[in-house]
Amino acid sequence: MNGDSSRKVQFILICNFVLNLSIFVICTLQQSTSDNLDGTDIFTQDFGSVKSHRTVRESNAPSQDADVELDLLQPYTDHHGPKHRTHRQVRECQDVRYGNVTHSKILSHGFNKNLSLPIATTRHKIHVIQETYYTRRDVLMHFSVINNPFRTVSVLEPKREGGCQEDLRATVLESSEEEQCIVAINAGFFNTTSGACKGNIVSNGHIVQDSGGIQNAHFGITKSGHLFIGYLSEIDLITQDFQQLVGGVLWLIRDGKSYLDESIKIECSDTEETGSLQYFASVMSARTVVGHDKEGRVVFVQADGKTGENGLDLKEFVEVLLEYGIVNAVNLDGGGSATYTVNGTLVNYPSDTCQDDKKFNCARNVSTILCAHLPRCPEVNCSGHGQCVLGQCHCQGHWTGSKCDQLFCPSNCSGHGTCTSDGCSCNAGYHGDDCGTPCSPGFYGLDCRYPCSCLNGADCDPVRGLCHCPPGYTGAQCQNVCPYGYHGEGCKDQCLCDDGCPCHPNTGSCNFSTLNTDILQAGVCYSQKKIKEEHLVPDQSSLYRSCLVALVITSILAALSLLVNIVLAYKVFTKEKRKRPRQPRAAPTHTRPLHTIASSDTDEELSSFSDYPMEQTSFIKKPKGYS
């Protein structure tokens, strides 16, 4: 019984192994058949002329990178764009429902409206493609939705402005440094040997390159705020008035529907029988796409991969884009060029090997890039007078305007100053925030900071500090009195006094009493000095006359006094002699009267002396009984 059980188990295991092996073989054959059928259903073309990816890589790889494995994905072999294909042919080839319109336009999100934040939203996804039970591919994808694209999305030349003219190439990170891109992806195609940019290019309103009417799908933003996707003629490059424009290859989605097959027919070259372009569209590879949703927001989408090994073909990419609501989309450069950066950091997995170490993969030097950045201000760096914050200039000091290029000061500095970034710079003689206040008396100059030095009550000019002298004074500081013979304001008026006499320096009055004491003293001083210098005799006639009059009067008075005294003396002498009595001679004494006046015998005699009362004085002692 045990032996029968072990045989049954062995039989079951063998049957299970055979069954699994059969399933594997069947799935493998189905996958091979499916690949062939897919190629026939999508393109309905013969693959006999299709070159392998390795052949394309070897035939186009630049010589300096011969030792480096480059993942090149090129839509055309020896040129760019469909040869001999005109815009008229494009119009004729497209479906009748589109008429003569070969592009799609929609007003961009937030145009002429307030800024919507965040500027960009980035998501990452592992997209699973499972065709059969045993075949599964995991593709890493990156999505970014950009608001206000008219103000936040730009086409940038490689490394710097003018990079296309110089045939420069740079990594996306290097080219995005100047604009400090929030999200940046590779964009236009380029010549991998010379580095020359391909397709029409407009960067920030400047036409960088005119492709001469090349009929490849383009992505652009017009100055009227519309998103443009599709084909354009040479005249459209001018009439559409592009702010940004970059060329791609193949219009993937048009107005919410797949446009891949029609686009391949339009963009294939007549001479190539669509061979390379078919391979370009059907091969698995890293892909980069730009498009927009129904709200007019720009969408960057990228799938990681390596040509022929992993990634997405364009049909699979279209299905993914439609799933996420993309309305219009254009395919950009892919393969090893596919690069995706966020805030200055590489977030995708490039397929090119590094030149310095082949064990690792590095981002390729590419041509133009698409950059999502902070809104630009109307003027770069706000004219150097402010800071750009989310597209608006925050002006410094007294600068104003959307570009910070206009100065504003209170009352325009009242017409007495210059408006500067620090405010009003007042002219000499004025001060204040608006330069509307004249200098206070006694001050002048810039900001009225200098004191005046005028004398004698003179006013000071508030601008230059010059003294405005009152009448009668002159000099830089009004320190001098008007010179002799002049008076009035500025001492310009001559005195009109008689005899050449001076006048009052202020009023011009000839009243001598009103002359200044200093002038009189100076006149005396000057005359005395002149007399000494010239040895002149001063005019003293008036003094002489005064002295003579005084002398005459004095002489007359003296003569009269002398005459009166003589007369009085004579009278006294004669009367005294008459009245002297005869008396006996008295014994001589040792004393004599100094003076004796005889008494009159009669009243008549005495009456003659009534007019001259006299007093008798004696120094002799009278004897008793003498009266």
Image (cartoon, rainbow, N blue to C red):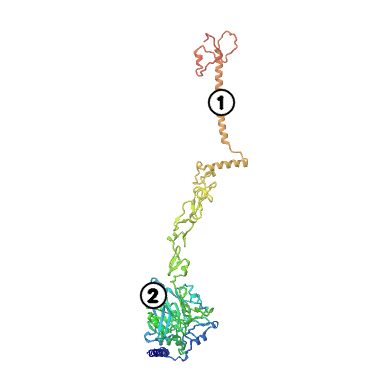
Residue 368 visible in the shown view? yes
How far across and how far down the image is residue 80, in percent? 48, 84
CB within 8 Å, label 2 to label 1: no
* Quarter of the figure that contains the N terminus: bottom left
Q: Residue at x 60, y 41 (%)?
A: 529
Q: Which mark is residue 109?
A: 2
Q: Which mark is residue 275?
A: none
Q: Earlier in the sequence, mark 2 or mark 1?
A: 2
Which residue is label 1 attached to? 558
Residue type at mark 2 is His
- Tag 1, which secondary structure? helix
How far across and how far down the image is residue 485, in percent? 54, 46
How far across and how far down the image is residue 222, in percent? 42, 77
Residue nearest the viewer, comparing 101 with 177: 177
Give the alpha-carbon distance from disc 2 to disc 1, as whole Å.
135 Å
- Tag 2, which secondary structure? loop
Residue nearest the viewer, comparing 609 with 255: 255
- Tell me where residue 545 sits by quadrant: top right
In the displayed structure, does residue 8 sit left or right of residue 309?
Answer: left
Residue nearest the viewer, comparing 428 with 243: 243
Query: Mark 2, residues whose alpha carbon is within 10 Å: few (<14), some, or many (≥20)?
Result: many
Residue nearest the viewer, comparing 445 with 611: 445
Residue 102 visible in the shown view? no
Residue type at mark 1 is Ala
